[in-house]
Image: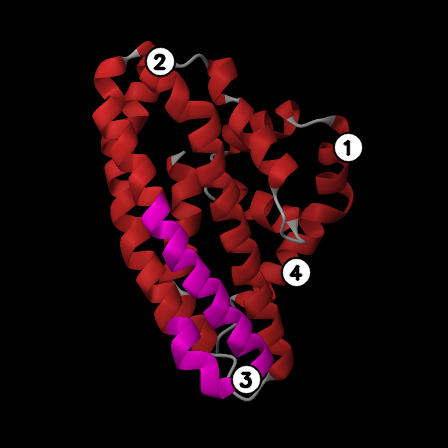
Amino acid sequence: MPAVHRVFRSSLASAPQLIASTAGDDDRRAVVANYYSNLMAFLEVHHDGEEQLVFPLLIDRAPETREFVEEAASQHTEIVGLMKAARAGVDSWETGGDPHAPTAAQSLRDLDTRLSAHLDEEEVQILPLVEQHLTAGEWGKLPGHAMGSFEGDKIWLIMGLIRENFTQDQRDMMLSAMPPPARKMWETTGEASFDDLIARVRQVG
């Protein structure tokens, strides 16, 4: 989970720089806007997975965790509002161009500030409870839920961002646990597509 959290932290922290780098370049603006649209689609299914697959089990098996779990869920609700504002900001910027860049950057900065605080709390309070009260199989349902519910158009982008934050052993384990079609997609087209796109996104000079 910390590896997944690092995807959100680093991507949102770089938003002002990436948005500024698109000034006067419609094609680049479309690429960066799509990157953030996919990131927020991933954040949505990430939180949904926790609410469906993790939080109820914690409350059921360890009722004393209810306060922490309900606080985390309430933070999700707050973050949803910031995500909606960020989606609207990015959409307006993508279609309206440079005049809307400051609003898009600010909306992503606001999301980053609140989400980072939430992730800090989750790593301190929730993840130790998960280790104590959930099985590896139950925890392992999260990636499948995310892949099955993801509404972005580049699932391979999300896979690549996560893999960047894994050790090689974790990358190998990730591949071995994938359904054969997903693994074939990654190995035949996904990895190359990710490498190409992420190089374009991060080329700010």
Give the mark nearer the N terminus: 1 vs 3: 3
Residue at position x 54%, y 51% from top? 41
The answer to which of 172 and 125 lies nearer the viewer is 125
Spatial CA distance of label 1 from label 3 is 38 Å
Q: Earlier in the sequence, mark 4 or mark 3?
A: 3
Mark closer to the chain start, 3 or 2: 2
Q: Residue at x 54, y 84 (%)?
A: 97
The residue carrying mark 3 is 97
Q: Secondary structure at mark 1?
A: helix
Q: Secondary structure at mark 3?
A: loop
Percent x, y of residue 188: 78, 43
Dot 3 surroundings within 10 Å: few (below 14), some, or many (20 or more)?
some
The residue singled out by tag 4 in the image is 196
Residue bearing the label numbered 1: 181
**Mark 1 or 2: the one toward you:** 2
Identify residue type, mark 2: Asp
